[in-house]
Amino acid sequence: MKAIIPAAGLGTRFLPATKCTPKELLPVLNKPVIQYVVEEALEPEGVDEVVIVNSHEKPQIEHYFAEDKDFDAYLRAHGKIALADKVAEASSLPVSFVYQDQPLGLGHAIHCAAGKMDGEPFFVLLGDYFVPDRQMCVRMAKVSREHGNCSVIAVAPVPEDQVSRYGIVAGECVGMLDGSPVTDSEAEGAVWKLSGMVEKPKTEDAPSHLFIVGRYLLTPRVMELLATQEPGAGGEIQLTDSMLKLLAEEDMYALVVDPAEGCDTGTPAAWAATNARMALKDPEMAPAFKEALGDVEL
Ligand code: UTP
């Protein structure tokens, strides 16, 4: 089974930095964002390859995952063995690449990897968001197994006045992942059977307060639907539009996750906050980080 990481977007919200540095290669502490995403993608049982959908304008991503024998030899010759091992970790990951010639939308990017999916279900993990404990996709796989190997997406609660910024799902809660009784249908661990999804609804039209987080486990049928998908919102080929068609043919479920579980890096503010959170959580880095921060008032 494979996972797809779409990483061919322009990263306009992060300009000017992303003019020359792909946003997926921005560092979180000492590692690029996309390495966290690749490591997370490999966590669910059965995932043995990650296909990165890249743009020809961003060759640095492929360079990052390629072996560099000369640099490795240089580091080792200078006694920097631990650093050489760290650098080698990226090139040891089972990553392959396909290319999206133009950023025509998330749905189009995913379809660029169709030829590599072997007609099997696959995960999609957005390349600018990661889950440090790597467990979100693992739990989504459990929901899928319990419901006939259906498609499953991760969703998270959003305040009512913000629903118009997101893709929002419709459906009903059918239980909790751990089998406990449902006390709050939008609480972490709630499982929903979906009946629809709507992009950026008005507050009064929103069918729930659950927005689509960037993690999907999809059946292969969605690739056939994406092949003929017309452009939708913003003139882009939208994954949501093909998922709506899929929903008309197959059951689809959603798992409610805690929004604090994941780290967004798609905007300067989110990226900076993610670095701060990760530095404070890292026992080796936290003391130096706090000292470097000084007496900052939050
Ligand atoms: P985003 O919309 O967050 O990324 O897409 P973007 O388009 O690069 O960013 P902005 O909005 O211009 O700042 C989520 C993920 O999907 C990829 C992006 O690279 C990102 O990892 N993507 C998006 C593609 O691979 N191709 C596309 O056509 C669009």
Image: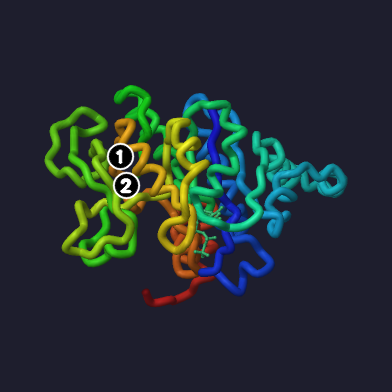
Residue 155: numbered disc? 2
Element under label 1? strand
Element under label 2? strand
State the image quarter where residue 248 is shown: top left
Residue shown at 59% from the left, 37% from the top = 50
Residue 254: numbered disc? 1
Residue 27 in sight from this viewpoint? no
Residue shown at 53% from the left, 36% from the top = 3
**Is 227 displayed left or right of 193 in the figure?**
right
**Is 69 displayed left or right of 54 in the figure?**
right
Q: Are marks 1 and 2 in contact (CB under 8 Å)?
A: yes
State the image quarter where residue 234 is shown: bottom left
70 or 126, which lies in front?
126
Neighbour tally class for label 1: few under 14, some 14-19, many 20 plus, Cα within 10 Å: many
Task: Find residue 155 and report its horizontal and vertical position in percent.
Answer: 32, 47
Neighbour tally class for label 2: few under 14, some 14-19, many 20 plus, Cα within 10 Å: many
Task: Inspect the image, locate mark 1, and give the three-letter code of the amino acid beneath it.
Answer: Ala
Residue shown at 45% from the left, 57% from the top = 264
298 or 236, which lies in front?
236
Residue 106 in sight from this viewpoint? yes
Task: Inspect the image, locate mark 2, and give the three-letter code of the amino acid beneath it.
Answer: Val
Residue 70: numbered disc? none
